[in-house]
Amino acid sequence: MAIVFALLEVYGYVRKLAHTRYGAALSHGRDILGIEDHLGLDVELGVNRWLTRHHDVSQVSVWVYQHMHTNLTMIVLLLCYLAAPDVYRPARNALVLINLAGLAVFFVLPVMPPRLLPGEGFVDTVAGAGFGITHSPPLPADQYAAMPSLHVAWAVWVALVIMALLRRYRVRWVAMLHPATTAVAVVVTANHYVLDVVAGVAVAMAALLATGLVWARNGTLYAAGQLISRKGPAPAPDADPAAESPHAPDDDDLAKPEPAGSRAESPS
């Protein structure tokens, strides 16, 4: 709990610096749009305008953005603590690393989200749904903390931890829908750029690899010992122990006469 309170204190300190970071955050936000335009990834405005014309989809996106982020993460962490102590420690450490990395980047590289960029035409659908421009519940948000997307980083963490908890069941793959849905929600609601999503995934995977919950061997990726994806050639199968053991004689062998001269003559 001490770590949690420390992270909250640092987050609060960074958030209070918002008035001193407006110019840098605005510049960095427009820089990201320029990079995405060069790469052909600048889809944020188009999908945000599409969302404003589809009320029901907008409400679902807002709900995913506002409620799934914290609630599901805390539920999964609690399940780890209660049911899987071997998973809990690396999972907890990975979540702490994700937040430490995010706070460091927020402090050094403040980035204004698309919804706050003046004159760009983005609509803040989360504010329009009644959560206010700061999207404050349950914790006042840092308005210039777009890069990386911690919504996406936490969602990747949730998916990989669920896969570790359910490693004996095929249904574990359904967990990957959570980061996919979250990535779409944060972009269409104009809270993050596409590159924020990429950065969020990268931060989460780096933390999960660093703490050992996810690990790589011979080009193959595992979560808690369970195969996720194979990037290189499949490892050679283990040798059959029976093939290496000496050949045991069967009944036919015992019935065969010994060749002449093979038996040592007894002394007379």
Image: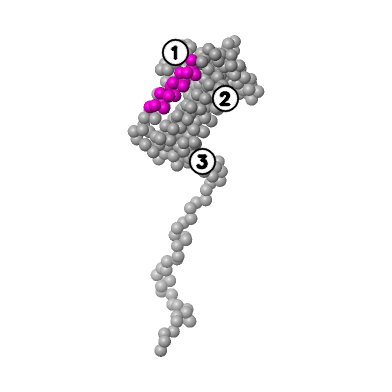
The disc at residue 195 is 2
Boundaries of the magenta span: 1-16
Distance from the alpha carbon under mark 1 to that under mark 2: 25 Å
**Magenta-colored stretch includes residue 198:** no
Residue 155 screen position, x and y as percent: 46, 27
Distance from the alpha carbon under mark 2 to that under mark 3: 25 Å
Q: Quadrant of the C terminus?
A: bottom left
> Is there CB contact under 8 Å for labels 3 and 1?
no
First in residue order: circle 3 vs circle 1 = 1
First in residue order: circle 1 vs circle 2 = 1
SS at mark 1 in the image: helix
Identity of the residue drawn at 44% across and 39% down: 224
The answer to whether residue 265 shows anywhere in this view is yes
| Of 61 and 7, the residue lying toward us | 7
The answer to whether residue 189 shows anywhere in this view is no
Q: Residues within 10 Å of mark 2 (few under 14, many from 20)?
A: many
Residue 251 screen position, x and y as percent: 40, 70
SS at mark 3 in the image: strand
Distance from the alpha carbon under mark 3 to that under mark 1: 41 Å
Pointer 1: what residue? 131
Pointer 3: what residue? 216
Q: Residues within 10 Å of mark 1 (few under 14, many from 20)?
A: some
The single residue placed furthest to the right in the displayed view is 38
| Of 10 and 178, the residue lying toward us | 10
Q: Quadrant of the N terminus?
A: top left
Q: Residues within 10 Å of mark 3 (few under 14, many from 20)?
A: some
Identity of the residue drawn at 41% across and 17% down: 138
Tell me the amino acid under the disc marked 2: Leu
| Of 259 and 213, the residue lying toward us | 213
Residue 34 screen position, x and y as percent: 63, 20
Tell me the amino acid under the disc marked 3: Ala
Q: Is residue 43 left or right of residue 172?
A: right
